[in-house]
Image (spheres, helix red, strand yellow):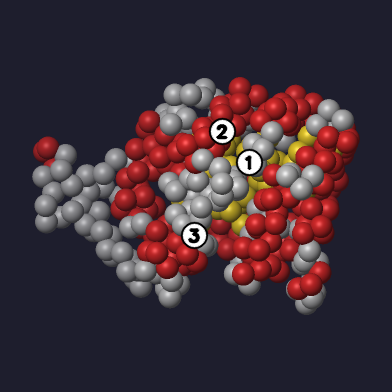
Amino acid sequence: MRLGIFMMPLHPLNRDPAQTLQEDREAIILADRLGFYDAFVGEHLTDKAENVTNSFIFLATLIDATKTIKLATGTSNLSHSHPVLIAAHAAMFDHLAKGRFIFGVSPGALSSDAEALGILDQDRNRLFAEAMDVILEIWARNAPYDIDLPGNRFKVSTARTQVPEVGRGTMYKPYQKPRPEIVGTVVAPHSKGVIAMGERDFHPLSANFLLPHWLPSHWANYSEGKKKVGMKPDSAEWRVARTIFVADDAHTARSYGRDDPKSPYRFYWEKLRANMMRAKRHVIFKRHEGEDDAAVTLERLLDELVIWGTPDKVADEILRLREAAGPFGEIVYAGMDWADPGLARRSMELMATEVMPRIERA
């Protein structure tokens, strides 16, 4: 099983972004040193608790600071930009990183981002699908492109202004051939989008927001999509993110990972719960779709969505999760605010050097 990290760190509003951005960089540099396979970084424009507004820019600062870890947009919100911009930026990043790049994509779910961009009343899922189709066409075709897909609002051509002999009108294709790995974050139970991922050979990352009993639906749908196009589903392509804290002793693990009022894990889930309730997307926190909203308490989320403990306990819980969820090929460690930098670093070290070897032996 591979080990990755997903950085959607929620920082207290009183913290200086100049400091938290550096701490988030340090987390990925440490992950690289510890042998993590990949690092996904999210982006939002209008949430003060989330400091990364453009994952490409943030990740570009890490290309020369890391050696082997794959740098992944997690995600690039395709409803926010014209697909020509994203196709060009992603291809350039892939060249800068010499293939250490994973293209993580999503529609962009934050409503205040959509309002600020003037697209609040638009179908962002459709914007996402249309943008994705155009990006893939740009990478597959040669200039002048002449992309005019049925029902797609984005039309792309450089035919009128192309000057082939000097390279004008031509965009770079990615460094990786035929394209980088494309990963989509999956939040909804029974997501039909995962079927489409399987059909197109995009790879799913099941979000750490999702209660464990919803996870088997992702593998089932991904497998269905793969089989529809005559491909065999490969469990190595499925990533599952979880909120994890590992400590040398059980008391520290429970306190920092759950009970302490200043715990970054408590802060994270308190904000996530409020965000999802406000957006009417809190079904992901329910044991069944008809469950009363009152059951979605912070304490229950901490009980069911935070894996905390000593290396033995955490390894056992991840193994039980895989038995119940299905054969995911990568566990993705969710990054938190570094309320205590020493404990945060130690948790990552123990995850890589103690927990993962126990999982591999099992």
Q: Give the secondary structure at mark 1.
A: loop
Q: Is residue 329 left or right of residue 91?
A: right
Instruction: Name which quarter of the figure residue 346 lies in.
Output: top right
Q: Measuring 79% from the left and 75% from the top, which residue is drawn there? A: 292
Looking at the rendered structure, the kind of residue marked 3 is Gly
Specify which label sits upstream in the sequence, 1 or 3. 3
> x, y percentage for residue 283?
71, 69
Q: Which mark is residue 108?
A: 3
Give the residue type that dot 1 points to. Answer: Asp
Can you give x and y, in whole percent of width and height, for residue 223 in the image?
A: 67, 56
The quadrant the C terminus occupies is top right
The answer to whether residue 271 is above or below residue 336 is below
Horizontal and vertical percent for residue 265? 72, 46
Q: Tell me if label 2 and label 1 are in contact, CB under 8 Å.
A: yes
- The residue indicated by pointer 2 is 23
In the picture, measured across the screen, residue 171 lies left or right of residue 113, that is: left
Horizontal side of residue 129 vs 157, given as left or right: right
- Do we see residue 243 in this rendering? no
Above/below status of 63 relative to 232: above
Q: Position of residue 32 (x, y in %)?
A: 59, 26
Q: Earlier in the sequence, mark 3 or mark 2?
A: 2
Task: Identify which amino acid the numbered label 2 is placed on.
Answer: Glu
Q: Relative to 213, is 293 above or below?
A: below
Please rate how many residues cluster around mark 2, counting C-alpha atoms within 10 Å: few if below 14, some from 14 to 19, many from 20: some
- Between 258 and 107, which is closer to the camera in this rendering? 258
- Identify the residue at image location x=52%, y=35%: 19
Q: Mark 1, mark 3: which one is toward the viewer?
A: 1
| Nearest to the observer: residue 94 or residue 300 | 300
